[in-house]
Amino acid sequence: AAAPAPEAAAGAAPLTPIQHWLFEALGERAGHYAQALTAQLPDDLDETALEDALNDLVAHHDALRSRFTPDEDAAADPAGVRWHIAERAPRLELARHTGPETDTPHFGPFDLARGPLLRAVLHRRGPGRAPALHLAVHHLVVDGVSWRLLLE
């Protein structure tokens, strides 16, 4: 029999060493540090099913529900940031885009205190071209290894 799935994490958590470093190194520019990828999707894509799948992904992976807020209590963490994992995330809305790919609007800075730390833009590229899904995730909660887990 398969082992039961672990309960979802929620509440405050200490920063990991790399998160701590990122806040100390980048300070107020930390919201700009993200990783992105683009995937081609089938022409007969069900956009509602895609949006539901993205929301299931956020619900399943605790890190995607993360928020990072200023914390004046330096004893809590010298970086002055508190990491909090929300029990539930607000519904992720799949953005739609039909303009040039270079104008895809999801690569701006993330609001680390409000989240979400995942952005998804569906780009309908016109007749005869498969739609593309552009994903951006803040590097505080994703790296090269975790991308593979998210994409599975």
Image (cartoon, rainbow, N blue to C red):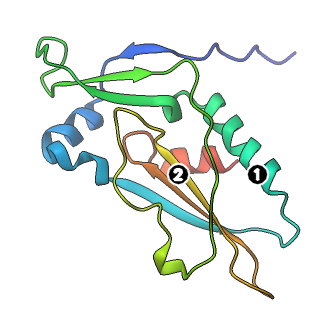
Q: Residues within 10 Å of mark 1 (few under 14, many from 20)?
A: some
Nearest the viewer among 94 and 142 is 94
- Marks counted in the figure total 2
- Tell me the quarter of the picture where residue 113 sits: top left
Residue at disc 1, secondary structure: helix
Q: What residue does disc 1 label?
A: 50
Give the residue type at disc 2.
Arg
Q: Is residue 127 above or below residue 135?
A: below
- Sequence-first tag of 2 and 1: 1
- The answer to whether 12 is drawn above or below residue 93 in the figure is above
Residue type marked 1: Leu
Q: Please state, as top left, top right, bottom left or bottom right, where the N terminus lies in the image.
A: top right
Tell me the residue that label 2 is attached to: 119
Q: Is residue 131 left or right of residue 87?
A: right
Look at 83% across and 63% down and name the residue there. 45
Residue shown at 64% from the left, 52% from the top: 94
Question: Residue 144: x and y, percent?
Answer: 47, 52
The picture places residue 73, in percent across and down from the top left corner, at 14, 13
The reply, left or right, for residue 140 in relation to residue 152 is: left
Q: Please tell me how crowded label 2 is: few (under 14), some (14-19), or many (20+) other residues with Cα within 10 Å.
A: many
Helix, strand, or loop for circle 2? strand
> Toward which corner of the image does residue 11 lie, by quadrant?
top left
Residue 110 x %, y %: 37, 48
Q: Position of residue 23 (x, y in %)?
A: 20, 38
Residue 130 disc label: none
* Displayed quadrant of residue 71: top left
